[in-house]
Image (spheres, grey):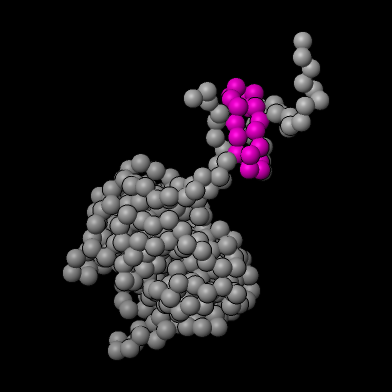
Amino acid sequence: MADYTNEKGQTVIATASDPANPTEGQIWYNSTSATAKVRVYVTPAWASGGDLNVGRRGAKGNGTRTAALHVGGFNPGFFANGKTESYDGTAFTAENDQVNPSGPLGGSFSQAPQGTAVSFGAQPGPNSTQTQLWDGTSWSLGNTMQVGLQKSWGMGTRDAGLAAGGFSYDGVNPGTGNYSQEYDGTSWANGNNMGTHINSHTGGGSQTAAWCAGYVTNVFEYDGTCWSNAPGVGPNQQLMGGAGPQTDGLVFGGQPATTTTSFYDGTSFTTGPTMSLARSNGGAASGTGQGSALAVGNGPNVVTTEELDGGFQTQSITSS
């Protein structure tokens, strides 16, 4: 019998569970599922997702590509909308409406899980300080913000959220804000201000490692205490969708509506895959990074969505 023990190569390990941090190309045998597996990189690409029940513009999203929440926006005629829809990776389900419609100008914490969403600002009134909390079934009012804003962007989660930028409106002229406000699941507190006034921007990350891009070419990062200008140059567009952590973020769409996607690695932006439909007005992004995101919304009140899938993945090895 031939002896292959001295041949070059790597040993395929047998393990009861998948490795916590497998490297690209690593192969193992999962004894629990009786399956051989491999870690591979799949080039990210957009594909059609499930349709919304109610098409609208300017809504906000949170959660992941397979467990997302789509909130607010406005209907034709620019009427504020408080509709809520959940997404399971296949289809949208109509949920209970918000207490007060947040419309297209409110914010939400993009990384919050589907069942613990937070909506803030916008309606009712031009500078609303309202906070609304989602428990997986219905909305309720929470403690108010320190400063009422429109077109602010939210990062983080319900228990550690961040609202950055936006503007307050005096009834005549919008005053752009460089505010940042932190939320602990109960109350809001003022954080250190941003170095530049921005609104209609996007971003991602957590309360202690956030990023913002858009409105200007600057990219801003937050470390939980202070804002700084990141070294990269961001897309000079407004009303983009955005998601993902500080080192694995993405932006897509913008004003005017476009099919472009850009990836952010914490240092610079690179070109990503194109969407099939040019999207604008915030994009209602949900997702965990460059390999998993959901784009919902467009300038016209369309119901179509797109899912971004790819990146490092664990796949089962088959004989085919």
Q: Is residue 3 left or right of residue 120?
A: right
Residue occupying the point 66% across, 30% down: 28
Q: Horizontal and vertical percent for residue 260?
A: 39, 62
In this view, the residue in front, 202 or 317, is: 317
Q: Is residue 187 visible?
A: no
In the figure, 189 relative to 296: above or below? below
Q: Is residue 229 left or right of residue 74?
A: right
Q: Is residue 206 left or right of residue 216?
A: right
Q: Is residue 142 magenta?
A: no
Classify the position of the N terminus by image quarter: top right
Q: Which residues are magenta?
A: 22-39
- From this viewpoint, which residue is outermost toward the left? 77
In this view, the residue in front, 283 or 158, is: 283
Q: Residue 168 occupies which quadrant of the picture?
A: bottom left
Q: Horizontal and vertical percent for residue 40?
A: 57, 41
In this view, the residue in front, 137 or 82, is: 82
Q: Horizontal and vertical percent for residue 318?
A: 53, 25
Total tally of numbered discs in the picture: 0
In the figure, 278 relative to 225: above or below? above
Q: Residue 279 occupies which quadrant of the picture?
A: bottom left
Q: Is residue 28 left or right of residue 107?
A: right
Q: Is residue 36 magenta?
A: yes
Residue occupying the point 56% across, 73% down: 232
Q: Is residue 238 visible?
A: yes
